[in-house]
Amino acid sequence: MRHIPYASLCAFEAAVRHESFARAAAELNLTAAGISQHVRIMENWLGVALFTRHARGVTATAAGREFGAVVASGLGHIQNAAQQLKRESHDRPVSVACIASFATRWLIPRLPDFRKEHPEIRINIVYALDAKTPEAASVDLLIRHGTRPGANSIPLLSAQTRPTCSTEFKLRHGSFNAPADLVDAELLHDETTAAWARWFALKGVHRPLKPGPIFADFSLMIGSVIGAQGIGLCPVSLIAEELANGTLVTLFDSPLDTDKFYWLIEADRLSREAETFRDWLVAESCRSESKLVP
């Protein structure tokens, strides 16, 4: 059996509902002759007369009225399902997978500004964990730390680190005039002691480091740095506010991890809302970088 001529169903349903080819044509932005052609296609496919044609117009036959009611019901179900799907697509939040330190230190404090500009867009932030792509994390956008993860990734902020302590800590423990002066200081470690070992090696200092606490990530370590408990290698871009207000100070203009960034990776298909949030992230990161304390 040949497939039903779906393109003619809407024209037929409108013609039955109005019992007029002219009014159906006006509704569908077609001509009366076009509606008549669609109806004739349906009649030929069904092998049944759906309208009686006369000088004053047309009148639906009993078969036409009965079939028209079924078609109207089916099109109504399709319309309702389409509207529901449309509502759900607009209600779906923009999902972002993010490492904890970037989220707590940079993104979340800025979210109120985005919500003020776009109150209609909901944002859902989840942990990035070990996801390497947005698809792996089931999100629209993924923010990762490290060297460039792929050609399509966008650098948001530099992740270079510098020896950092609180102003209070520096006042208590005196000035640190040379990198070697830090060896015996209270050093704080992010994940491992490897970062400090690399920083000292770059400065030509090769001495055993004083044992110090190791934190699972930067979002934990920064609390100790701010609390005047020691010196940590901190990503400058995530402590810009504390540097600006004098709570924290960097001790040497000797950055580590200059090749590392916080990268934005987007899924293959983004909603209009996700594109809006992506563009805001990029613009906000440019503003943030321009305000960094040298």
Image: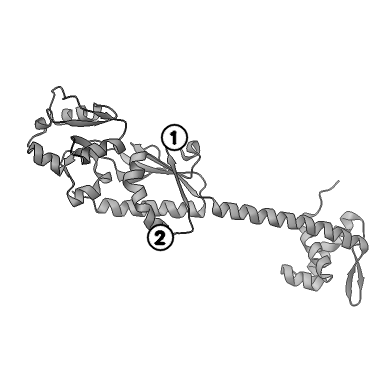
Disc 2 secondary structure class:
helix
Disc 1 secondary structure class:
loop
| Mark 2 lies on residue | 116
Q: Count numbered badges in the picture.
A: 2
Q: Is residue 23 left or right of residue 65?
A: left
Q: Is residue 213 left or right of residue 30?
A: left
Q: Residue 107 appears at what percent x and percent y?
A: 36, 48
* 78 w.r.t. 235: above or below: below
Local packing at callout 1 (Cα closer than 10 Å; few below 14, some 14-19, many 20+) is: some
The amino acid on which the numbered mark 1 sits, given as a three-letter code, is Ala
Q: Residue 37 appears at what percent x and percent y?
A: 82, 64
The foreground one among 188 and 41 is 188
Of the numbered discs 2 and 1, the one sitting upstream in the chain is: 2
The foreground one among 17 and 156 is 17
Local packing at callout 2 (Cα closer than 10 Å; few below 14, some 14-19, many 20+) is: few
Q: Determine if residue 31 is in view.
A: no
The amino acid on which the numbered mark 2 sits, given as a three-letter code, is Lys
Q: Residue at x 26, y 39 (%)?
A: 223
Q: Residue 146: which quarter of the image?
A: top left
Q: Is residue 105 left or right of residue 197?
A: right
In this view, the mark in front (2 or 1) = 2
Q: Residue 98 appears at what percent x and percent y?
A: 40, 41
